[in-house]
Amino acid sequence: MPPLASLARPNDLTGKTFVLTGCGAQSLDEATAIALAQRGARLLISTRQDAAQRAADIAAQAGLPHQQIVGHDCDLLQARSTADFAAWVVHQTTSLDGLINNAGIHLDLLRDHKSPQISADGQEIHWRCNYLGTAQLTFALLPLLLQTAQERGQARIVQVASMLHSKGQNRWMFAPQTQHDSWVSYGSSKLALMHLSLELHERYQALGLRTYSLHPGAVSTQVAHKGLQERPALAALRRALLPLEKLFLLSPAQGARTTVHCATAPDAPSGLYWRNSRPASPSLELADNAARTRLWSQTQNWLHQTQHAR
């Protein structure tokens, strides 16, 4: 396997700053962080808890100065936590070259639940974490991204979506499913992220903002452990078979290739969906301009309500 720093076309990132969410142990974003940091980037990372220690661990793993990677806790299910992380980022840097939104959840992998799991503030949990939480952070950091784009020529937003966005439907972005399916909930949250990415491209590309959505591939990470947390026997079996799984799935380092490409490749065009470091065809649901406009408006209303509720 090539070293992490060669997972995409080499380029010097010295002087650039990136925010990466969801940098858990053995995660896709941990591998992305190492690849970017080894090229000289400064990284501001998040995990739900113990992010400062995670940052120190990643820096040590990559053999880099601990000041190059710093962390702060962020729980995308909580508006206050997300706002605090955004405020911390703004305090840490006067420029932001890239935001890589990787944090998310995929629960109930065996479809045990016949009704949706609901967050503390009343939202379906995949929608709340994967879409609304990510949208809140993205909009909170958008002014800094646009400022950097004006000063440096460009800034980037990379949404780690999924090929499973094809299981989502635009109608479920605005109403509960008629028959609950956790995979459809997950897919709809990722479809919404891709709508958001495309709308940001259309509104701000002239100002230097470049946006990307991507499928990283089938990657062996800890996500499935959490998705099976209500089936401890199966979770234990999966852990026992993990060496076999790794023979068939991508490693986090391999899965990070497309993310790194979208975050750094000079010739990667904005506003597209990517697989295997190449543009790919998304679900036809993404072509619905009316749904995208409605989602934008609904998201703005939710953000306004959330801000006033804090």
Image (cartoon, rainbow, N blue to C red):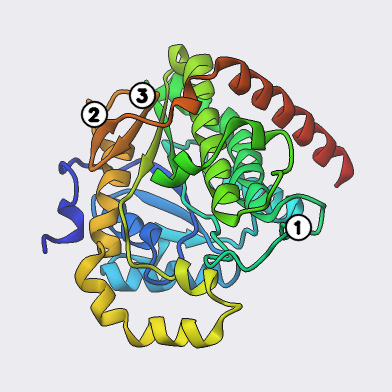
Q: Are marks 2 and 1 in contact (CB under 8 Å)?
A: no
Image quadrant holding the N terminus, namely: bottom left
Q: What's the residue at 38%, 31% (across, down)? A: 282
| Marks 2 and 1, how far apart at CA | 39 Å
Residue 119, label in figure: 1
Kindly check if marks 2 and 3 are in contact, taking CB atoms under 8 A apart as contact: no
**Camera-nearest label, 2 or 3:** 3
Element carrying mark 3: loop
Q: Is residue 193 left or right of residue 127?
A: left
x and y, in percent, of residue 218 in the image: 32, 57
Give whichever of 295, 182 is nearer the camera: 182
Instruction: Measure the alpha-carbon separation of dots 1 and 3.
Output: 33 Å
Label 3 crowd bin: few (<14), some (14–19), many (20+), radius 10 Å: many
> Which residue in the structure is indicated by mark 2?
266
Q: Amino acid at mark 3?
A: Ser
> Residue type at mark 2?
Pro
Q: Are marks 1 and 3 in contact (CB under 8 Å)?
A: no
99 left or right, relative to 88: left
Q: Tag 3 or tag 1, which sits nearer the N-term?
A: 1
As helix, strand or loop, the secondary structure at mark 1 comes to: loop
Label 3 sits on residue: 270
Q: Nearer the viewer, mark 2 or mark 1?
A: 1
Q: Residue 112: percent from the left, percent from the top?
A: 62, 68
Q: Nearer the viewer, residue 133 or 123?
A: 123
